[in-house]
Image (tube, rainbow, N blue to C red):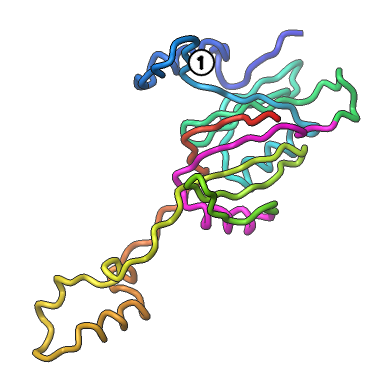
Amino acid sequence: MPVRKVKTKRSFRAAVSTKRRTAPAKPLAKSGGLKMTEASPSFTANDLEKSIAWYRDVVGFVIGERWEREGKLVGCELRAGSVSLMLGQDDWKKGRDRTKGEGFRIYCETKKNVDELAKQIESKGGRLDQGPTDQPWGVRDITLTDPDGHPVTLAGAVPSPTRTSDLFDPASTADLPPGADLFSLVAAAAALGSPRDIESEPPAREPSICMRSATISVV
């Protein structure tokens, strides 16, 4: 039976084609051969609604297009920033005892602070396989496993060490009284926090995680 897509009349192929035409041009690899513009990993779930809830409510993805067959949801697009993942209901043609996630990993890069992301996931009931860890190749990442056993790695930049100049504004010394101990004031600012930090507005809440790339690792 044909698959009916919800909330849009465009086919998935047409949607991808439009995205390619409107997306900004990216530099092509210098090596010859096949040229790619994007990749959208696709995998199946034993319980599609349960997996959708995990990626949306725990990790922070948002739901894009949805596909139905005979009025029943059979797949959807998961979006985060410029990354899209395709999740579908297993049709059990390969058996119900098939183990998922073996020799497979979804590796995503994000611009968000990985430590904050880890706290966000745990606060929503998620369990980390590995907490924030600095890797030798220059990233800081966390790992977790989705409800069907697919391992997921979320990687971001390694945080820069806090500098005294980030906590204290040297320009503010213009109004200091004569003989003031500048080093004591710097130490006090580091201990109490900068007035700029105290007065700054809280960051806006983001309902979804922002990803900039996704890679599938198969071993």
Q: Nearer the viewer, residue 212 or 64?
A: 212
Is residue 39 placed above or below 45 in the rendered structure? above
Left or right for 210, reference 127 = left
Seen as rendered, the residue at the extreme bottom is 179
* Residue depicted at x 84% and y 32%: 99
| Residue plotted at (26% across, 86% down) | 184
What is the crowding at mark 1: few (fewer than 14 residues within 10 Å), some, or many (at least 20)? few
Is 147 magenta? The answer is no
- The residue located at (45%, 18%) in the rendering is 19
Q: Is residue 180 left or right of residue 119?
A: left
Q: Residue at x 13, y 84 (%)?
A: 176
The residue range painted magenta reads 99-125
Residue 201 is left or right of residue 157, and the answer is left
The reply to whether residue 126 is in sight is no
Q: Can you tell which quarter of the image residue 132 is in?
A: bottom right
Q: Amino acid at mark 1?
A: Ala
Vertical arrangement, residue 170 with respect to residue 46, above or below: below
| Secondary structure at numbered mark 1 | helix
Q: Position of residue 26 (x, y in %)?
A: 37, 21
Q: Is residue 69 visible?
A: yes
Q: Position of residue 179 (x, y in %)?
A: 12, 91
Residue linked to disc 1: 15
Foreground of the two, 183 or 52: 183
Q: How many marks?
A: 1
The front one of 64 and 138 is: 138
Front one among 85 and 107? 107
> Which of the 4 quarters of the picture holds residue 18?
top left
